[in-house]
Image (spheres, helix red, strand yellow):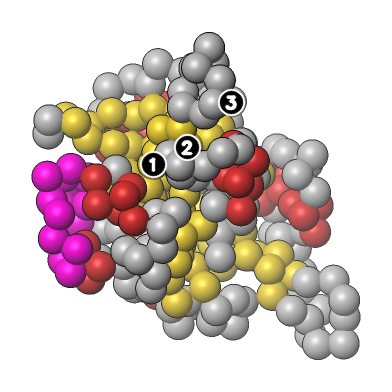
Amino acid sequence: MCGRYVSATPPDQIAAYFATGAPEALLEPSYNVAPTDDVYAVLADGGLRHLDAFHWGLVPYWAKDAKIGSRMINARAETVATNNAFTSAFQKRRCLVPADGFYEWAKRPGQKTKQPYFAHPPDGGLYAFAGLWEVWKGPNRDQPPLRSCTIITTDANDAMTSVHDRMPVILPESAWDAWLDRDNDDVALLGRLLVPAPPQIITLRPVGTAVGNVRNNGAQLLDEVEVEP
């Protein structure tokens, strides 16, 4: 799964990286993005890419309560085309979720506390997670619609298997246009994009357990720590 990640790159740099305009909503940099936070996502409309802010935790259009989004932060690649919560978005509302990297926790033999790791690009660039977005209007028409998103996960690649059995789908630039194209309804083609990323784009760094608390934030969370044998 992907339950925490880092989004600390300034929005103008994210916009330049994904060839979008500037976002209307400016978000604070976060070294500990958690479910239900507002996050950036890239989507396309008429061939033009946009960088916008979304609530992390997809709320299906048919939901009666927005709280369901806290259970929809991830969508499994294996079932995203058939799961009722994601089917509609998979067909027409796909996005990219920019990230500097993500956290995952590994079990430690004989210990209750898991060891967190930060997975990031070796060159210090950005990941483009495959995501879906949705608009929820809710029962109260006086409130503005809620725009939300989810991150798609798949099996871990060789770089991640020692830490966890799942990881976000990380799309290469060559797949961005096909993924974002709202006229692309080739479910089979889209499904073939949802595979583990090459292991060489993952660098793992053990970090401190402070990242486990959502109230902790700041660049110090990325400091490398020693792992006991």
Residue under the image location 54 percent in, 52 percent down: 72
Say which of 145 and 208 sits in front: 145
Mark 1 to mark 2: distance in Å?
Answer: 6 Å
**Is 139 left, or right, of 125 in this rendering?**
right
User: Relative to 216, does residue 76 appear above or below in the rendering?
Assistant: below
State the separation of the CA atoms marked 2 and 3.
18 Å
Q: Are marks 1 and 2 in contact (CB under 8 Å)?
A: yes
Determine the secondary structure under disc 3: loop
Verify whether residue 28 appears in magenta.
Answer: no
Residue depicted at x 63% and y 65%: 104
Q: Counting residues from the N terminus, which is met first, the one under dot 1 or under dot 3?
A: 3
Q: Is residue 111 above or below residue 114?
A: below
In this view of the protein, which residue sits in the foreground, 124 or 142?
142
| Bounds of the magenta segment | 174-189
Mark 1: which amino acid? Trp
Residue 59 image offset from top left, x and y in percent: 51, 42
- Image point 29% across, 37% down: which residue? 43
Q: Position of residue 207 (x, y in %)?
A: 71, 60
Q: Quadrant of the N terminus?
A: bottom right
Q: Is residue 7 left or right of residue 176?
A: right
Question: Which percent across, then down, holds residue 156?
Answer: 47, 76
Label 2 sits on residue: 148
Residue 175 vs residue 118: left or right? Answer: left
Residue 133's tag is 1
Would residue 69 be found to the left or right of residue 95 on screen? right
Crowd around label 2: few <14 · some 14–19 · many ≥20 (10 Å):
many
Is there any visible trace of residue 130 in the rendered image? no
Residue 28 got which mark? 3
Task: Tell me where residue 20 sits by quadrant.
Answer: top left
